[in-house]
Amino acid sequence: HSPMERTFFPALVVAGVRCSEYGAYRVIDPEGKDYWPRDLAFVPGREHLTPELTVRAHVEVGRVVVNFLITYTHTDHVAVGEEGEFESVSASRTMAVLLDERPSGRKHAGQRRILDIELQQEGHLVVRYERSDLWRDAVRCATEALRTLVQSTRFDVEQVMAERLGAR
């Protein structure tokens, strides 16, 4: 793991714990081992909650190895009847976090742009950080990335709820 990954990973864990509403947060390391940094509803002998936030390190997406792939799932409820019945509405989004080890020229910027577009076409939000960003404030970078992911996922759920309410 690079120094940037070793700097960003703990910041991502801290920011993830802050944005995970009920604590179902899962980290999967490159070897596939699960970690649950905060699972407040976990009781020994019971299964973990379904994670709302999952962080995976070193994930191959197409022809790119993404430093971190983050998935966020948001669920809300919409009233469907006059008798107090509710229907669950869920949406998931993924974000690819890419860490640029060193600044590069125009040629590399063009290649990075092409890779970003490929990841976006696969349905991922894409965030890139340079070394100077992480050295200044890694927790702020992680918090900004997760805030963007959470807000866009919640917006997706709100749109679906509005469509279902408007269809009535």
Image: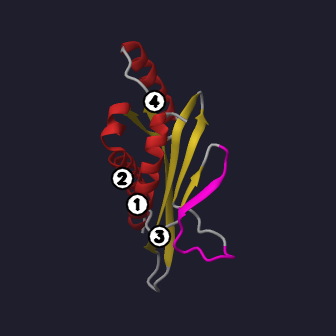
Say which residue label 4 marks.
116
- Give SS at disc 1: helix
CA neighbours of label 2 inside 10 A, class few (<14), some (14 to 19), many (20+): some
For residue 43, which numbered disc appears in the image?
A: none
**Residue type marked 4:** Asp
- Give SS at disc 2: helix
Say which residue label 3 marks.
22
**Residue type marked 3:** Tyr
Check if residue 65 falls in the magenta segment.
no
Q: Which residues are magenta?
A: 31-46
What residue appears at the point 39 percent right and 20 percent down from the top-left corner? 109
**Residue type marked 2:** Arg
Q: Is residue 99 visible?
A: yes
Residue found at the far left of this picture: 136
Task: Please name whichever residue, 113 or 65, is drawn nearer the observer in this view of the structure.
Answer: 65
- Image position of 109 (left or right of 48): left
Say which residue label 2 marks.
147
State if disc 2 and disc 4 touch (CB < 8 Å): no
State if disc 3 and disc 2 touch (CB < 8 Å): no
Check if residue 42 falls in the magenta segment.
yes
Circle nearer the N terminus (2, 3):
3
Q: Between marks 2 and 3, how big is the CA–CA gap?
A: 16 Å
